[in-house]
Every structure is written in C-alpha cells, then in structure tokens.
Amino acid sequence: MPAFQLFSFHQHRAVVRVDFNVPLDESFRITDDTRMRAAIPTIQKIRNDGGAVVLMSHLGRPKKGPEDRFSLRHLVKHLSELLHTEVLFASDCVGESVRQQAESLKPGEVLLLENLRFHPEEEKGDPAFAQALASLGDVYVNDAFGTAHRAHASTAVIAQFFPPERKMFGLLMEAEVKNAERVLHHAEKPFVAVLGGAKVSDKIGIITNLLPRVDGLIIGGGMAYTFLKAQGQEIGKSLCEADKLDLAKEILQKAGEQGVKIHLPVDSVVAPRVAADAPTQVVDHTHFPADQMGLDIGPQTIAAYTQAILSAKTILWNGPMGVFELAPFQAGTKAIAEAIAKATQQGAFSLVGGGDSVAALHQFGLENRVSYVSTGGGALLEYFEGKTLPGIAAIRES
C-alpha cells in the first residue's frame, strides 16, 4: 500500500471515497461541515500534484432511490468555497454520461458524484456497481473512515479493481487509523477509557476488548445505572437494561480479576423527567429517591473522575456522562471534557470519538485541546471492539 503523501498524482485521475454525510437544515444549508473540511487536505494534495479528482459519498439514508433532500448537489456551493475552485457535479454516480464527465476532467478539476445510496447496489456491495465506479479513475483513495466499517461497493469492493500500487488511504484515513492503533495497541500507561451513553448493550464489545488493555474504566451516562443496579443499588426511575444485569455483574467481576479499576458514579443530578425546566437535585447514591431518574453525574463523581483522568497518560473518550444537550444536565460531560483537555496539556495522549462526545467538545469549545478528534462514530466503535473494518482491510490486505 503506497503512502499517500509520497504518491505523485500528476496525470492521474483519482476516485476518492469521502464521507460527506453532513447534517442539513430544512433549507438544505449545512449545519456542521466538519467531515467536509476533514477531507480538504487530501483533495488539495491530489490537485496540487496535477491530478484530477472524482469525489463520491453518501448522504443520509434514502430508501426509494433518488430524493432531492438527499442530493449531494446541496453541497456543491460550500465545497467550491472550501476548495477555492469551481466543483463540477454529476447528476448520477455511474453511467455513460458520468464516465464522459470524469474522462474530460483537466488536471486540478474536481467532480462530485451524486449520492451513492440512490443505487441499492452500493449498500449491497455489488461488484458490477463497484467496477462502474472504479472505471471513473485510475487511482483509488479511501478517505472515509466514517464508513470503513461498511462492506459497501465504494468502500470495500471497489478496491479489487485497482492494482496494489494504485489504491491507498487518504490523509484523513491515515490519521484515523494511526491514532486508533496508537490507543489500542501502543497506549502509554496508565490507560484510562471513559465510556458513556445510554446502553450497556451498545458498549459490550468495546468494554470486553478494552478490559485486558486499560488500567481504569470510567463509566457514565445512562448505562452507569445498569451497573449500579447490578451491584444491588437503588436507582429510582433511572434508565436500566434489566436483561443486561447479569452481563454487568460479569464485567465487574472480570475487571476485578484483571486488576482494572471500574469507576462508577457515587452521586447524580436527578429529576422526575427529562426536560430543561424539570426541578433538579443532587443525590448521594445511598439515598436515591424512587420517583427520580439520574440524568448526569454529581459533583463527588466529577471530582473522582477528574482525578482518574489527570493521572492517565492515554485517554479514550466515547459517550457523554449525561443528557448534556440540556443545560441542567451538562456539568458532568463538560467537566470530563475539561479534565481530558487539561490532561492533554500535561502530556497525555487523548482520542475522542463518537458523535455525542465530539458534539460535546464542540459545544464547550474544547475540540482543539485534545490530541485527536475522530470523524468516525460507528467505525471507531467497531475498531475498538477488535473487529476488522472492511474499508481498511480492502486496501491493506491486497
């Protein structure tokens, strides 16, 4: 697999899989262009070398073929501004007219294809569809870490139609893989993972795979209450997966056997309902009111979690500590983000991934104060579960 930075794209036409699955408002304005900006260095390197660029991506989850609200044409104007050049648009992603558009590209020009998922063959991983996409260029670049866990035509199957020296990761994909591997395989100790979110069931894989590797596991969010209930604690009306109590017990037991400290909340910010105007109080977990639900970690827990984070040399954060979107329940998530930023400043390596964690970093203005912010939610989670990601394997194992 060639190194992207060392490859000369002069006189080449690169088919680049990007992740432009960005949120749009009702007027089709982009509300967060993070994923688009993340791909710009890869696109500009190809253009600066004297190569042409054919960009392909999905947007949303169209179910019935082409739908205007999922059209990538809504992205053309903003992408042109980001690249400081006119971006051309193809009204489909395969077919004779698209092939002609691609073949007529001059060095430095950029063509954005229509939404890949307007064709069901994309998600089915159809080889003929992948070959049609491959015919649009002579080099394949995968720069879409956010879809690396999907065995789709444009992310995994397409690679087989290029020789090994003509397929590679883009700069974003290289950075994502390098930083994820650093945490999973080369973490400087102590290594602490901070896991939040609603359900234990969503994090079983990552917890199981991380237990032999971490020194500490900090648990917050709704899933913390399943663990607390498994220990016999009262949790009121808090979220609890009753069918996962035995699993939670098993995880706690395994952690003890492996010498991993699991940090669980000792107090919570509670309310009778999830609402910004709900009356709140801080409760110690020895006296949890039956009619309240835990919606954020409390001050004692924040202090303990902060201390654990500041003692770490490697930190992975995936998932918020509470319902941080609502002001009364954001203190815990904000404190964790600030602790990770401070630990990073003191020399720790920190990787933050998962949509909610990244959204929290942006909300609190801390995205530039951690070591690396991943663009891949599901892909990062599956990587840390120890799974082989098809989009990575397709290029590495050829």
Image (tube, rainbow, N blue to C red):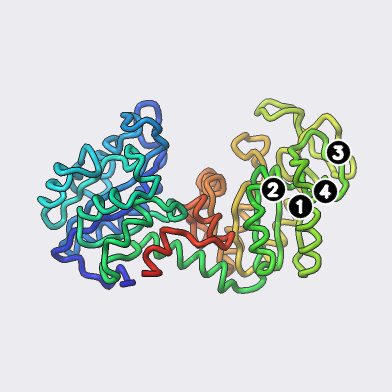
Q: What residue is pinned by disc 1?
A: 247
**Is residue 397 shown left or right of residue 210?**
left
Amino acid type indicated by mark 4: Ala
Q: Quadrant of residue 45?
A: bottom left
Which residue is at 42% across, 53% downward? 151
Of circles 1 and 3, which is in front?
1
Residue 121: x and y, percent?
34, 44
- Does 177 sit above or below residue 245? below
Q: How many angstroms separate mark 2 from mark 1 (CA)?
A: 9 Å
Element at label 3: loop
Q: Earlier in the sequence, mark 1 or mark 4?
A: 4
Contact (Cβ within 8 Å) of mark 2 with mark 4: no
Amino acid type indicated by mark 1: Leu
Q: Earlier in the sequence, mark 3 or mark 4?
A: 4
Q: Quadrant of residue 352?
A: bottom right
Amino acid type indicated by mark 3: Phe
Q: How many angstroms separate mark 3 from mark 4 (CA)?
A: 15 Å
Q: How many angstroms separate mark 1 from mark 4 (CA)?
A: 9 Å
Closer-to-camera residue (114/394): 394
Q: What residue is pinned by disc 3?
A: 288
Q: How many marks?
A: 4
Which residue is at 39% across, 61% downward? 173
Give neighbour class at mark 2: few <14, some 14-19, many 20+ (Cα, 10 Å): many
Q: What residue is pinned by disc 2?
A: 200
Residue 116 appears anywhere in the view:
yes
Q: How many angstroms separate mark 3 from mark 2 (CA)?
A: 21 Å
